[in-house]
Image: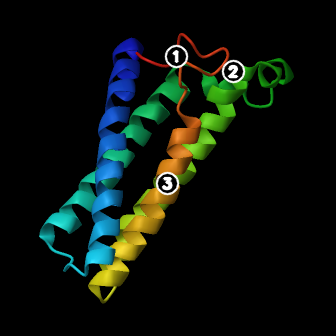
Amino acid sequence: MMTGIQHLHGALRWVVLILMLLSIVKAFSGMSGGRTFDKGDYKRGLFTMISLHLQLVLGLVLYFGKGWSSMLGNADAMANTVMRFFSLEHMATMLIAVVLGTLGHSLSKRAEDDRTKFRRQAIWFTVSLVLILSSIPWPFRPGFEAYGWW
């Protein structure tokens, strides 16, 4: 079962990345083009946030189900690059990225004018995306060849 969840977590990453990129591009174009923030913009931000949260839930299932959480505080695990990445760095960074992505949707929803809505989405989703890209176990990172493309 964990293998299936890991495959789903790996595949859903592409959905998250595409939605994040699309939301960022649309937010910057809406901000610079003076468009109105319509239902489509709201829904795109909502679906981006939902995909982030779903990815987080799957990640938490893997984090506790595969035993990565038990390695925290273990000196031998922290000395190993891959174990430290999955038990500490990946989870902490992705959790922060999800919080920032949620802020992007929530703060844009509460803004009064359209330009501010687009600007808030653009800023928070961009910061969230940078954190996500920095913490994906890409196969070109040394030691991560087996983890990148499930």
Q: Nearer the viewer, residue 88 or 36?
A: 36
| Residue located 33% across and 55% down the image | 49
Where on the picture, by quarter, is residue 125? Answer: bottom left
Does residue 144 appear to the left or right of 79 in the view shown? Answer: left
Q: Position of residue 73 (x, y in %)?
A: 80, 31
Where on the picture, by quarter, is residue 113? Answer: bottom left
Q: Which residue is mark 1?
A: 147
Which mark lies nearer to you, 3 or 2? 3
| Residue located 27% across and 72% down the image | 30
Between marks 1 and 3, how big is the CA–CA gap? 22 Å
Callout 3 amino acid: Ser
| Residue located 58% across and 40% down the image | 134
Q: Position of residue 34 (x, y in %)?
A: 25, 81
Residues under numbered marks 1 and 3 in contact, where contact means CB atoms less than 8 Å apart: no
Between marks 3 and 2, how big is the CA–CA gap? 23 Å
Q: Position of residue 105 (x, y in %)?
A: 35, 66
Q: Nearer the viewer, residue 119 or 73?
A: 119
Where on the picture, by quarter, is residue 137? Answer: top right
Which mark lies nearer to you, 2 or 1? 1
Residues under numbered marks 2 and 1 in contact, where contact means CB atoms less than 8 Å apart: no
Q: Earlier in the sequence, mark 3 or mark 2?
A: 2
Q: Residue furthest left?
A: 39
Residue 83 circle label: 2
| Residue located 72% across and 27% down the image | 84
Callout 2 amino acid: Met
- The crowd level at tag 3 (other Cα within 10 Å; few <14, some 14-19, many 20+) is many
Q: Which residue is mark 3?
A: 128
Quarter of the picture holding the C terminus: top left
Q: Earlier in the sequence, mark 2 or mark 1?
A: 2
| Circle 2: element type | helix
Q: Earlier in the sequence, mark 1 or mark 3?
A: 3
